[in-house]
Image (cartoon, rainbow, N blue to C red):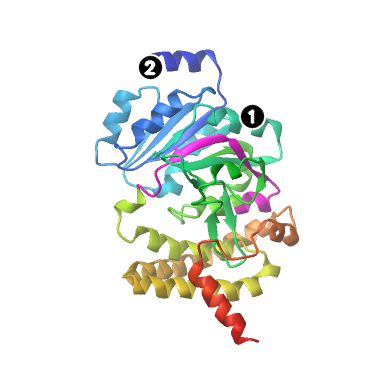
Amino acid sequence: MSAKYYMIAVTLMKTNVAVVIPNWNGIEEIGACLDSLRQQSQPVHIIVVENGSVDGSYEFITTKYPEAEVLQQTHNLGFAGGVNVGIRQSMADGYKYVALLNNDAVAHKDWAKHLVATMEAHPEVGIATCKLLGADKSYIDSTGDTYTTWGLPYPRGRGDKHVDAYDQELDIFGASGGASIYRSKTLEQIGLFDEDFFAYYEDVDISFRAQWAGWKVRFVPQAEAYHQISVTSNRIKGFTTYQTFKNYPLLFWKNVPRSMMPGMFVRFKLAYLSIYVSSIVHGRGWPATKGFLSMLRLFPKKLRERKRIQATRKVSDSYISSILTHDLPPNAAQLRRLRSLLTLGRR
């Protein structure tokens, strides 16, 4: 659909959905993303947060996609800061729903339609997420987020080639920020993405906060999108390691139920130390150490935020426990071996 006819369609069919796409030097990927939004069966308002790119992205988007609202930033605000700019704009403009889509993802033409239908049918749902496949559609990237009793989050189903095994719509723990929809009313209540996370696990944090506030998170398998994993983060050496070591503890201390902390902290400390040693062995010790030091600086602030979350909580510790995964992530082979050795040592 051309830009001219897309704008006519959006005018004739009132939309209550804004889709926010953060973009940083994504000129090679964002065209396919925006093309897929032009073709949505549910008209959407497109907001691109131009996150300080220097590759000509701004000129490309404004020339080729004049229907998109482009919010140009002077520097890279990260995923959390970038999407917050777009979310604030969409909420100020009165959109009922705000969807997020990575600039390196492509949405099926009925992606928005299915997500909106679920939100309309389930007023208790504050966040809904889709079946996010790899770019070639042969394996699962994410069917939502899971948080374990080891303090480690992971994408539900990642790497599974049995893509049809995830065809049941159901309530889950969390939603991937790469291709999900958020009720504006929910965000007004719990706040936006935590910009201290910058990138990685800010979507787990906001899902945790939504759960504490009594909202449900739902997986909608009929909605599909296709993702080139880690295209943006791979452009910066050590970026993922740094963000992981900074954000894992922030997520833990900010959100884990008090009654679960003693046992979870022992497991989390073991996992964190194990991953740190592995990072050193693989030449990533410095970004891991910098991440840890950044976490220490932010630690007091997260404890204050935890107090606010707990003061307004609507659910019990036992409910939160029931939606966590009481095991290690499936891909934590090294930690599983370590757990086995420690278990044998206690016999």
* Residue designated by label 1: 117
Check the picture and name the quadrant holding the N terminus: top left
Amino acid tagged 1: Ala
Amino acid tagged 2: Ser
Q: Which residues are magenta?
A: 208-231
User: In the visual, does 211 lie left or right of 56?
Assistant: right
Q: On screen, 55 above or below 62? A: below
Check the picture and name the quadrant holding the C terminus: bottom right
* Residue designated by label 2: 2
The mark that comes first in sequence, 1 or 2, is 2
User: Could you tell me residue 201's position as x and y percent?
Assistant: 50, 55
Number of numbered markers:
2
- What number is the disc on residue 230? none
Label 2 residue SS: loop
> Which of these two is toward me, 136 or 74?
136
Residue 88 visible from this viewpoint: no
Q: Is residue 210 magenta?
A: yes
Q: Is residue 25 magenta?
A: no
State the residue at coordinates (34%, 37%).
Answer: 29
> Which of these two is toward me, 106 or 68?
106
State the residue at coordinates (51%, 48%).
Answer: 193
